[in-house]
Image: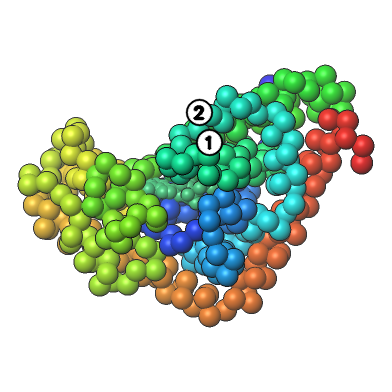
Amino acid sequence: MATFPERVFSGVQPTGNLHLGNYLGAIKRFVALQATRPCLYCVVDLHAMTLPFEPAQLARTTREVTAAFLACGIDPKANVVFNQSRVAEHAELAWVFDCVARLGWLNRMTQFKEKAGKDREAASIGLYNYPVLMAADILVYRATHVPVGDDQKQHLELARDIAQKFNNDFSASIAAHGHGDAFFPLPEPLIQGPATRVMSLRDGAKKMSKSDPSENSYIALTDDADTIAQKIRKAKTDPEPLPSEVEGLAQRPEADNLVGIFAALADETKANVLKRFGGAQFSAFKSALADLTIEKLAPIRSEMLRLSADPDFVDSVLADGADRARAMARPNMDAVKDILGLVR
Ligand code: TYM
């Protein structure tokens, strides 16, 4: 198959508070990737419309997620930082993909089932179609690498299936228009590190999530030091001391989660963390974890607060990013139209 220049794309929804799971599973890794390849980081405001939302809050959280990107260390000059709704090509390509993706594929999406809940008939069409728009987000830039948390794995598989089917269905036209044997790359999920699935602090079987009714279940990026320390102190554990080997974390989901969080914050492996804390009681480990979490999150929080007082700057980053994103997306969209026989 054709080779494509490497390019990173990922998105974060502006829905409510960003939490430690978003940071460790995604944003911290966005920061690390910027040195490796050209990157686009998108605040996916169109996705945030798939569940009931407040317009005033959507505008505020869009700026807040942008501020979080910057506060965590994403450089908006070296990378493209923007909000999705400003680049109409995302929605335009999503329609094309609606005609490529199969109903049976979407019916398998577990996140739709979770989010739609019991009354599936009352879910928006947008919620159902969500993964198709996500495929368009990535492929409108022909991005090759997508850093995400573990919960997005199935959506990434769908994006690959859509790319593959487009390439197959229109192979003759793709070749005739000079694009060789494939127009879209099959984007590769980057789901790596010790915190690809950060769990609730109250229940090791549940994912850390901003929609959890218990605020003690997650650490928000905007939590202050006292709140962080308190939430970690209250985190659920078991009565045994920490094991010295990773194997000892099996069947101990809460311990596994806290060790994973420590490892991800410290840029270490779980094995290394356990070398240091094996045999320790949770009280001692929790106190070290609280110190480390506060050390890492305090500068992010204060920079987010500073940026929240400077919305003009944040808006200028989004406007500039959107211009650059559009300039990359438009030629790809035009090529898709030519491939499909859509007269332009
Ligand atoms: P969203 O906004 O729910 O989450 C943003 C990122 O955070 C990761 N994440 C987690 N990682 C580890 N542990 C957790 N508990 C946890 N919770 C969330 C998510 O995996 C994600 O990487 N559909 C996406 C947004 C999106 C997107 C895209 C992503 C839209 N278009 C194109 C990549 C490429 C979402 O809802 O993320």
Q: How crowded is mark 2: few (under 14 residues within 10 Å), some or many (20 or more)?
A: few
- Which label sits on residue 17? none
Amino acid type, residue under disc 1 in the picture: His
Horizontal arrangement in the rendering, residue 228 relative to residue 189 (left or right): left
Residue at 83 percent across and 19 percent down: it is: 172
Q: Find disc 1 in the rendering and name its residue.
A: 155
Of 67 and 100, nearer the camera is 100
Q: Find disc 2 in the rendering and name its residue.
A: 108
Of 150 and 6, nearer the camera is 150
Dot placed on the residue nearer the N-terminal end, 2 or 1: 2
Horizontal arrangement in the rendering, residue 89 relative to residue 54 (left or right): right
Residue at 87 percent across and 28 percent down: it is: 177
Residue at 43 percent across and 53 percent down: it is: 22
Q: Is mark 1 within 8 Å of ligand 1?
A: yes
Q: Is residue 79 visible?
A: no
Please, which colouring scheme is shown?
A: rainbow
Q: Quadrant of residue 3?
A: top right
